[in-house]
Amino acid sequence: MALSFLLSLLFFTSTFSFSLLTAVEVPGDNSADTEFIRASCKATLYPDLCFSSLSRYAATVQRSPATLARVAVAVSLSKAHGAAAYLSHKTAATADDDSGTGAALHDCFSNLEDAVDEIRGSLKQIRRLRPDAHSGSVRFGLSNVLTWMSAALTDEETCTDGFEGVAEGPVKTTVCDRVTTVKKFTSNALALVNGFANNL
C-alpha cells in the first residue's frame, strides 16, 4: 500500500512541478515585483525562506497578493509531497520495526498524508477564487483556505511531536528536519493567505 501511494505521489509531484514551472514567465526587469515579494515576506515567520523560495516567481506574481498567496500554497504543497514521498519510503523500510521509531514514523506519515490533502484542498479552493467576484464569496473561500492550511500545519506539528519520546538517531533527525522545513513553508503560505484576506 505504501509503495502504491509512493508511485502515485511521485507521478503527481512530477506533474505538479511541471505545471507550476511552465506557468512561470522568464524574469525580465521585474525589480518592483521582486521587492513586492520581499516586503510581503516580512509578514511571515521565516522571511528569508519565503523570499528565496518565491522570488523566482516574481514575473508571474507581479504585485498581486492573490497570486502570491496561490503560489505560496502551491510551493507548500510541493514541499509536503516531497516529504510524504520520503516518509512513505522510510515507513515501508521499517514495516517490521516495532520500536518507538517505527511507530513514530507510521504516525508521522499518516499525519503528513492528511496535511497533503488539506494543502491540496487549499490550492484547489484558492485557484477557484475570482478577484472580480463578490467580496463575500472571496472571503468565504479564503476562510476555508485558512482553516485547511492551519489544520495542515497542526498535522505537521503532530508529526514531529510524535518523535519527542523516541531515542536520538539518524532517522529521527532526518525526518524531523525534513518535516520542520515543510512546516516553515506551510507557515509562510498561511501568513501570506492571511495577509491577502486582511487586505480585501
Image: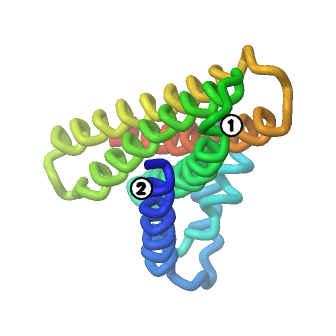
Compared with 131, 45 (above or below) is above
| Quadrant position of residue 168 | top right
- Taking 92 as reference, is 62 left or right? left
Q: Residue at x 70, y 23 (%)?
A: 99
Q: Residues within 10 Å of mark 1 (few under 14, many from 20)?
A: some
Quadrant where the C terminus is found in the figure: top left
Of marks 2 and 1, the one in the foreground: 1
User: Can you give x and y, in whole percent of width and height, for residue 30 in the image?
Assistant: 60, 76
Q: Amino acid at mark 2?
A: Arg
- The residue at which mark 2 appears reads as 70
Secondary structure under the numbered disc 1 in the rendered image: helix
Q: Earlier in the sequence, mark 2 or mark 1?
A: 2
User: Can you give x and y, in whole percent of width and height, for residue 58 in the image?
Assistant: 57, 69
- The residue at which mark 1 appears reads as 180
Q: Amino acid at mark 1?
A: Thr
Can see residue 72?
A: no
| Quadrant position of residue 57 | bottom right
Compared with 53, 165 (above or below) is above
Nearer-the-camera pick, 159 or 126: 159
- Taking 136 as reference, is 171 left or right? right
Secondary structure under the numbered disc 2 in the rendered image: helix
Nearer-the-camera pick, 48 or 175: 175
| Quadrant position of residue 90 | top right
